[in-house]
Image (tube, rainbow, N blue to C red):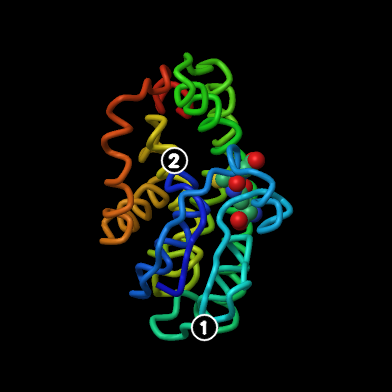
Amino acid sequence: MALILCGLNLSPFVRKIRVQLEEKGIGYEIDPVSPFQAGDEFTALNPLRRIPVLKDADAGPDFVLPGSSAIAQYIERKHPEHPMLPKDAANYGRALWIEEYADTELAGKVGMGVFRPMIFPQLAHKAPDQAAAAEGARKLGPVFDYLERTLAGNDWYAGPDFSLADISVATHFVNLGIVGLAPVPLRWPALCAFLDRAFARETFKRLNAEHDKMKAGLVKINVTAEELWT
Ligand SMILES: N[C@@H](CCC(=O)N[C@@H](CS)C(=O)NCC(=O)O)C(=O)O
């Protein structure tokens, strides 16, 4: 297999690239590198020591590409069939912005704010930090507000078709779901309907199912979405 994606399935950024590849029907292998456990050789692959990192033997034995946004653009350029970025300039621009917003603001508030305090201790057989996670979750309200109004009555974030923008947003809600949270339909109806559409796709269904067994054994956040956000 030419493409090897280095990283863990729990990473929303790894999932972003996996959904893109699977939507396009491109085969790949996963090398389950953990950025927290990898040795010095990982620094040579990505000086930031983050996942995902892509290797592509087609581009040469030493070809290594870190960073999900660079990887996503590389894949689109190399495999233009079944495009995951809009052709129309305005929609293309929107897709890039939504990807950036999801990769930074949404990723930070879900990942560092909620997922880490809940899940990382449990992976080390310790109790989750429920108070920190609840405090982090409260900060998500304005982010969901922005994602709600940016949909502006559309099915998808950047034009009529499902795109990288939609993948980039939805992937973080998979991690939020692992913690036991989802946005409240009463306050964010468009965002919730968007997530239903995204998670009904075969790609997301398949990748979400990978977490089912692990999810069943995890302690969930002990506040409800209604308590947090309504
Ligand atoms: N902007 C990067 C973010 C990647 C990222 O933050 N990955 C996390 C896992 S979800 C990571 O490797 N974290 C390692 C660390 O924080 O040390 C991308 O889009 O690839």
Choose top left, top right, bottom left or bottom right for residue 154: bottom left
Say whether marks 2 and 1 touch (CB < 8 Å): no
User: Which mark identifies residue 175?
Assistant: 2
- Horizontal and vertical percent position of residue 5: 49, 61
Q: Nearer the viewer, residue 211 or 200?
A: 211
Choose top left, top right, bottom left or bottom right for residue 140: top right
- Horizontal and vertical percent position of residue 142: 59, 40
Choose top left, top right, bottom left or bottom right for residue 217: top left
User: Which mark identifies residue 24?
Assistant: none
Name of the residue lying farthest toward the right:
47
Which amino acid, mark 1?
Lys
Q: Is mark 1 on a helix, strand or loop?
A: helix
* Residue at the image point whose x is 60% and y is 43% from the top: 38
User: Which mark identifies residue 78?
Assistant: 1
Image height of 193 relative to 119, above or below: below
Q: Is mark 2 on a helix, strand or loop?
A: helix
26 to the left or right of 94 = left
Image quadrant containing the C terminus: top left
Image quadrant containing the N terminus: bottom left
Q: Can residue 145 be seen in this view?
A: no
Number of numbered discs: 2
* Residue at the image point whose x is 51% and y is 64% from the top: 165
* Residue at the image point whose x is 49% and y is 18% from the top: 128
Q: Which of 45 and 79 is in front in this view?
A: 45
Looking at marks 2 and 1 on the same chain, the residue that comes earlier in the sequence is marked by: 1
Closer to us: mark 2 or mark 1? 1
66 to the left or right of 127 = right
144 to the left or right of 108 = left
- Horizontal and vertical percent position of residue 145: 54, 45
Which amino acid, mark 2?
Asn
